[in-house]
Amino acid sequence: MIEKPTVLVLGAGASAHCGYPLGGQLVARLCALRGTPELDALPEGWGRDTAEAFLTRLSRSGHYSIDAFLETTPEHAPLGKYLIAREMKTHEMLDGLFPPNHSGWYQYLFNALLAPNGRPQFSGNKLGIITFNYDRSLEAYLHAALQNRFRLDEAAAAEVLAALPIIHVHGILGDYPAIPYQTDCSTTELLGISDQIQIISEIADQDEEFCNPMFRAGNAMLRGAERIFFLGFGFHPDNVRRFQFFLPENVEGKLLRGTIFGVGSIDRANLVARLVDAGFKDSDLPPDGTSCDNFFSHAVSLI
């Protein structure tokens, strides 16, 4: 059980072990749709020519992510969000979250959340989660693990899961478990799901105001934490800034740690230098080799 007030801030790398693509990988997968029958099944109003032109521009834009591209072409936001949602839904396979596939750090978290007597009692934990991801893989893993470990029905497991606060600051691919974690999804359902996600260009971003209610809730969660751990988070300056929290005076006395897996020494040095104004120290970012999956054994204990 997690007894110290703790917040996990999750970026795309936190669910990469579930098969979800990182920014550049998502761009590549969407651009690979050009010339395929996949573009013949778009909702009314988006023809193949429109989609082909959009994906060609994305491919040749030099952007690392589709969000960054859509920030410069907001008129394409609805189509972009639809394609994002469709790609993400293809990864909603429950078996992919469990052995013989890779459970990743989700397995460690699940066991850490159990009561000292081993019973499912998430409400006793002092943990909050803030995620920049649209996917529901974490919720689906915990929900299924509760059902199978303790022989709970779906409703009882959902009640336990609801005690764990999870904030999706950019929206989510459908409320969970109301919308099942599965690949099957009609065009109409996909349109509804895509409306629930927010890309950067749609966020009302002003320096002195919160972008949306989720960032405001995230700010409150961070202020109450003693420990803040970043998993698979890219530390984009705008994402750090939008919490209106990360300043030396606000993080003083709090334990900060984060993964920067795959980041080279030069990029790491530049990142550390940039984050100084946000209150981070060099020791807050373990050197390359510490991943989300080994973070709680190599860098810091969650319990």
Image (cartoon, rainbow, N blue to C red):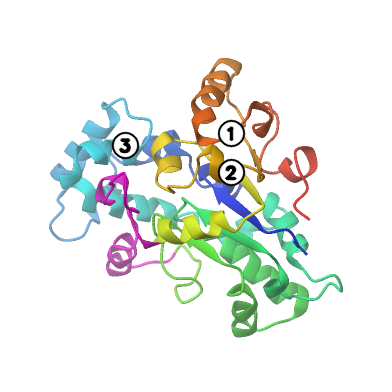
Residue 129, horizontal then vertical, whole percent: 57, 58
Indicate the position of residue 193 as horizontal and vertical percent values. Answer: 34, 64
158 sits left or right of 126 in the view: left
Q: Is residue 35 above or below residue 118?
A: above
Q: Which mark is nearer the camera, 1 or 2?
A: 2
Q: Nearer the viewer, residue 285 or 254?
A: 254
**Which residues are the magenta region?**
184-213
Question: Which mark is first along the chain, 3 or 2?
Answer: 3
Residue at the (58%, 65%) spot, across then down: 140
Asked whether disc 2 touches disc 3, contact meaning CB atoms under 8 Å apart, the reply is no
Dot 2 lies on which element? helix
Is 167 magenta? The answer is no
User: Is the magenta region chiefly helix, strand or loop?
Assistant: loop
The answer to whether residue 172 shows anywhere in this view is no
**Camera-side residue: 61 or 242?**
242
Outermost residue, right direction?
117
Tell me if label 1 and label 2 are in contact, CB under 8 Å. yes
The CA span between labels 3 and 1 is 25 Å
Question: Which badge, 1 or 2, comes first in the chain's sequence?
Answer: 2
Disc 3 marks which amino acid? Answer: Ala
* 198 inside magenta stretch: yes
Q: CA distance from mark 1 to mark 2?
A: 8 Å
**According to the image, label 1 marks what residue?**
280
Identify the residue shown where x is 59% and y is 59%. 224
Tell me if mark 1 has few (under 14), some (14-19) or many (20+) residues whose alpha carbon lies within 10 angstroms of its own: many
Q: Which residue is mark 3?
A: 68
The residue wearing badge 2 is 251
Q: Give the residue displayed 70% in from the left and 34% down from the top.
A: 290
Q: Quadrant of residue 156?
A: bottom right
Alpha-carbon distance for marks 2 and 3?
29 Å
